[in-house]
Image (spheres, rainbow, N blue to C red):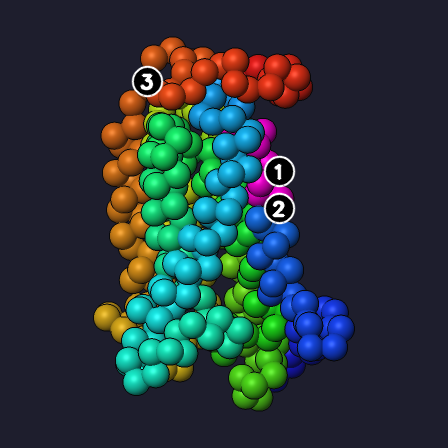
């Protein structure tokens, strides 16, 4: 059976003595920086959701939510039995093991706490923040591919690859499928939605679109991804990733259905004053 050779790439980008910068860490950093840059511009579009300074403050909250939520989710959803026997190893972040669904819960909690502390409308604020999340998902999946981890199921498609450590069988490069679905495709849909003023004026619509969109993309991607060896297939042949994504689809659909226009386009959410947004930035964006 023919298969494409896997491009062997050192997971460590740069190492100076004991300090190593890995591709996976670089993916997180790049996703956060690009997301911060874009979110600063999105929140200023009418109806304004926050100031650029508030977005900058939220970056720290979001980063902590990603790290601690992602790790806790991995421990709770994927290997609870193992960490019950060695709970202190849950703190060993350098050993790897992160869960997107756990990270999502961590960021949602950070969103609620931050919005409450700054007296922001949580749904309006969340609607802009979720639009940049696919950037991090895209780079994260590319890092999974570089690391040769989370490989796909055995396949005979012409582009199948033999991954190191996954046996001799050719497999789907499912990390690239997920980068395309969860990253590029979802990002394109959200950018189209957020560009429409009437979409931005419906609190919760964009957040719902992100949750439902990611859930659907993850469920599709899991059909090509090999389940974790210590979990395998679960209820009705579904994977853990698919089961965790079903509530996201349901909650996302509910948020979109209940979304209601709050005033005319350009109305201000609670706690936000139009003057707080830099005039130069507003002009640059055409006041949208």
| Circle 1/circle 2 CB separation < 8 Å | yes
Q: Which residue is mark 3?
A: 262
Q: Earlier in the sequence, mark 3 or mark 1?
A: 1
Foreground: disc 3 or disc 2: 2
Query: For the stretch drawn in magenta, what is the main secondary structure?
Result: helix
Callout 2: helix, strand or loop?
A: helix
Judging depth in this view, the residue of 76 and 59 nearest the camera is 59
Q: Vertically, is 77 above or below 49?
A: below
Disc 3 packing (10 Å; few <14; some 14–19; many ≥20): some
- The Cα atoms of the two marked residues, 1 and 2, are separated by 6 Å
Q: Is residue 143 at all visible to an observer of this figure? A: no
Q: Position of residue 112 (x, y in %)?
A: 34, 40
Judging depth in this view, the residue of 276 and 133 nearest the camera is 276
Q: Which residue is mark 1?
A: 37
- Residue at image position (24%, 70%) is 236
Callout 3: helix, strand or loop?
A: loop
């Amino acid at each position: 059976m023919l298969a494409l050779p896997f491009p062997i790439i050192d997971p460590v980008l740069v190492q100076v003595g004991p300090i190593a910068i890995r591709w996976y860490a670089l993916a997180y950093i790049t996703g956060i920086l690009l997301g911060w840059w874009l979110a600063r511009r999105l929140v200023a579009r009418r109806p304004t959701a926050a100031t650029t300074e508030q977005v900058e403050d939220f970056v720290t909250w979001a980063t902590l939510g990603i790290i601690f939520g992602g790790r806790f989710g991995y421990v709770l959803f994927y290997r609870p039995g193992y960490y019950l026997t060695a709970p202190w190893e849950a703190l060993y972040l350098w050993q790897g093991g992160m869960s997107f669904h756990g990270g999502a819960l961590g960021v949602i909690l950070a969103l609620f706490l931050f919005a409450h502390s700054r007296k922001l409308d949580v749904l309006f604020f969340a609607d802009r923040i979720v639009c940049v999340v696919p950037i991090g998902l895209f780079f994260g999946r590319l890092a999974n591919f570089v690391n040769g981890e989370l490989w796909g199921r055995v396949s005979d498609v012409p582009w199948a690859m033999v991954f190191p450590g996954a046996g001799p069988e050719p497999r789907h490069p499912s990390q690239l499928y997920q980068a395309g679905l969860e990253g590029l495709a979802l990002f394109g849909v959200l950018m189209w939605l957020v560009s429409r003023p009437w979409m931005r004026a419906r609190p919760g619509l964009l957040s719902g679109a992100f949750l439902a969109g990611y859930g659907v993309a993850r469920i599709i991607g899991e059909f090509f991804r090999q389940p974790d060896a210590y979990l395998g297939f679960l209820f009705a042949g579904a994977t853990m990733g698919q089961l965790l994504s079903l509530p996201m689809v349901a909650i996302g659909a509910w948020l979109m259905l209940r979304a209601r226009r709050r005033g005319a386009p350009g109305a201000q959410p609670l706690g936000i004053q139009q003057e707080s947004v830099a005039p130069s930035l507003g002009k640059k964006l055409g006041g949208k």
